[in-house]
Image (cartoon, grey):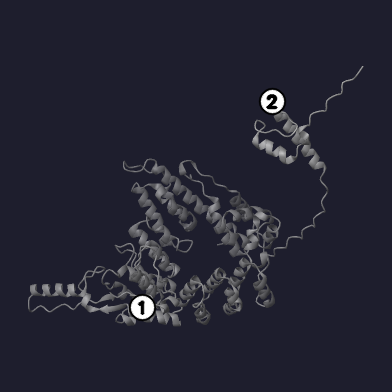
Amino acid sequence: MTSTPTPPAAPSATTASWEQLVTVALLGTDRRTPPGCEPGPGAAAAVLDAAAAETVRRRAGLRPARAARRPERAPEDPRPPLPASAARRLAMLLADRPGAAAGGRRGAAPDLMELLPQWLATANARGFAAPPEALPALLDAARGRTDLRPAALRFAGSRALWLARLNPDWRFALRGTPGGGTVPPGPGDGDRVHRLWDEGLFAERVALLAALRARDPAGARELLASTWATERAEDRLMFLDSLRTRLAPADEPFLEQALADRSRNVRATAAELLSALPGSALAARMAARAVTCVSLDRSLGHAPCGALVDARDASRAHDDHALERSPAAPAAPAAPAIAVEAPHECDAGMERDGVVAKPPGGRGERAWWLGQLVEAAPLATWPARLGGRGPGEIVALPVADGWRSELHAAWCRAAVRQRDGAWARALLGPPTAPEAGGPGAVSLAERAKLLGTLTPGERADWVAGFIATHGLSEAFQLLGMCEVPWAPPLGRAVVDALDIARDAGSYPWSFSGVMGLAERCLDPAEAGRLDGLLAVPDESEDAAPGAGGYWAEAFQRLATTLRLRAAMTRELGVG
């Protein structure tokens, strides 16, 4: 009797590699099956069995790795610990994760995460150390919000840098300080300064130069000059920007050399810095060019301000009017006006001094060149050029042939660059002026920059007057220039304007930005003034539907936030 040989078993799916199994799982068994597995209803189960077997095999085949070295202990933080109540408050602020409210409404609850920057600023001012258990949440918060990073890293201290070396998600903390998270070199550590400057990464070198410039401007400039010729153009530009800190006449020789740099952007930055030094040679050259373009002309005085006719038309109009007057009537003296003759070319000397020859789209060449000359000229040039008048009198003069906006805009930029408060006040004008822009400013951005040259008290008073006259519709950018907490007159002006907007039936969501700013900037002492605004008002027929409830919620949230801020400062031992 002859036996029949048993046929060999079909190959199993377990012989497939892990990569093949992953491919089958991604494509599906209807499209592909692993080697040795027949298509059909049982293919999916066969693939899962094979994956389980392969997983066991892979784990069993792992070899033990060499034990890693235990990390060094975290450094001690010598600062005093937070009071217990303040530590609980910090945990509450870090745990808050507000979601988008339905319909865009925030409700009456405060936004705790928006209070964290102020809490950190106060804790840093008091010199407290961060609780170790709060560091991971603090670093996570700073990772998601770059605006928090400087204050958060200062509060977290050296322990945060120790943690950042262990977690790649927190590497931003290492980039935030020179030397990859090490303590910046001190005043007497010259060798370490030069080693870090010669060998450090670009971000480390930028941070080092900024730190050195803040404490030793001359030393920082000498360090930069030592390698200037070998730096890349984009690096030279970033390094040169550090000279804005504590800019002084001693920086002029270095900046004059930078005017001959190969990079146009470097030349432009050097020229801008030199023009911020009114006594520099570049400022004198720009003044000499600017005075040839701007002069006082008494023959133009009868034309309307801002749209003067040329001298012949003005003279003709004057003669026609004289025929109608009585022969005995004396002729009124012509009011002076500013005449402008913009440059007709941009020569090589102008370009070397930072004048950009090609204007942006929509700008005329001559107007573009004029603006650059005037903004770079020292503002002290103009009283002598324009009849000994002060800034206020000069700004009030009419300007011929439609050059007023160009000239005043250039003076605005010059006042900001040279930090000249007298010119800034003149160009801003009174906040109650019918023209919201004042006599010289041409945009909200210009007004905000001009405000930055004034003292904190002057800024608050001017913005309060502006809001009282013009309301809040254009005040958001101006409010951002005011010191926090807002001075009482400014705080009262904001609350009164919000109350007026509510009573007028205005759309409440259009004021949500100002409301959010008030929550962070209004003095907590103003919370009591809000008690009368918490009730839902009667809605007029032309009011937005549901506006009354929204306003009540917003004022309730504002009052609650102010009281919470007051509690935060008490917990930190302030006041």
Which residue is more in the foreground, 266 or 470? 266
Q: Which residue is drawn at 42% across and 57% down?
A: 476
Left or right of 191? Residue 478 is left
Q: What residue type is labelled 1?
A: Ala
Residue at mark 1 = 290
- Image quadrant for the C terminus? bottom right
* Alpha carbon separation for disc pair 1 and 2: 88 Å
Question: Residue 306: which disc?
Answer: none
Kindly state the secondary structure of the residue where label 2 is placed.
Answer: loop
Instruction: Quarter of the image for the N terminus: give it.
Output: top right
- Label 1 neighbour load within 10 Å: few <14, some 14-19, many 20+: many
Q: Position of residue 550 (x, y in %)?
A: 42, 44
For residue 422, say whether it is visible. no
Decide: is 552 above or below 346: above
**As shown in the figure, which amino acid type bears the numbered disc 2?**
Pro
Instruction: Name the image quarter holding residue 411.
Output: bottom left
Residue named by callout 2: 41
Tell me, yes or no, whether the two marked residues, 1 and 2, touch with CB atoms within 8 Å: no
Which percent across, then down, holds residue 262? 51, 74
